[in-house]
Image (cartoon, rainbow, N blue to C red):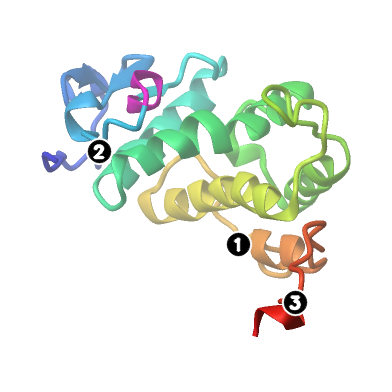
Amino acid sequence: MSKFQLQKIANILNYNNLLIGNSRFTDDVWNLTEFIVLKTITDYFKKIHFSYIKNEDIKLTAKLYAYNKLGTIKPQTVVKRIISDLRPFIKYAELNNINSFKEINKEIFISFLYWLKNDYVIEYGKKKGQHIRNRTGYKFSFVVEEIIKLGQKNDWNVPQENIFVHIASFNFWSAEKETSTAKTMPIPEDIF
């Protein structure tokens, strides 16, 4: 696997010259194929797709987050966070006319958490129409929390106050322990 050679992006006004592999920062699809060599991962999941994010300010912040994370975690993890984990927040933002991460305050974040828990349903696959599990809800809300916290350190267009003082993704989603429907059966006595 090739290593990312990332440029510092502080104080850059023109992102067009910034390269991610053979894609430009301003592209709506970043092709990371050369960095993800696992054959078990399909081509779709070797690219970060930003085109589903219609709002340009939210898209820029998501790209800054992805660029920053590419230097610290596996590229396939970054792809998953952007094209899967962030998608419910983008839907929530569109439904609630949120045009920037900066608009998120404690009340909006809590509202997002409850929307995920009570109203959001899976839109595709085997579990289409079902509500998400706590573990999935945590992943979906954690990416938003992480974008805001990372953005505060890097002066992105995010709220500067700490909105996670009394509520954070982990606390919310771990408050109710999930019970598994698949029970482990005891080993029959005649085996011994």
| Residue carrying label 1 | 162
Q: Eyeballing the image, is 138 above or below 29?
A: below
Q: Mark 3 is on which residue type? A: Pro
Please name whichever residue, 191 or 105, is drawn nearer the observer in this view of the structure.
191
Magenta stretch, main secondary structure, is helix
| Nearer to the camera, 111 or 151 | 111
Q: Can residue 34 be seen in this view?
A: yes
Q: Residue 29 carries which label?
A: none
Give coordinates of residue 21: x percent, y percent. 17, 26
For the residues marked 3 and 1, what is the alpha-carbon distance in whole angstroms?
54 Å
Q: Give the foreground label among 2 and 1.
A: 1
Magenta part of the chain: 42-46
Q: Residue at x 25, y 42 (%)?
A: 10
Q: Is residue 59 left or right of residue 65?
A: right
Which element type, helix, strand or loop, lies under badge 2?
A: loop
Residue type at the position of mark 2: Asn
Do callouts 2 and 3 mark residues in contact (Cβ within 8 Å)? no
The dot on residue 11 is 2
Query: How many dots with numbers?
Result: 3
The relative height of residue 165 versus residue 141 in the rendered view (above or below) is: below
Q: Does label 3 or label 1 sit earlier along the sequence?
A: 1
- Type of residue at label 1? Asn
Towards the viewer: 22 or 6: 22
Q: Quadrant of the N terminus?
A: top left
Q: Marks 3 and 1: CB-CB under 8 Å?
A: no
Q: Residues within 10 Å of mark 3 (few under 14, many from 20)?
A: few
Residue furthest toward the right? Answer: 118
Q: Which of marks 2 and 3 is nearer the N terminus?
A: 2
Residue labelled with disc 3: 188
Q: In the image, what residue occupies the spot 22% across and 18% down?
A: 23
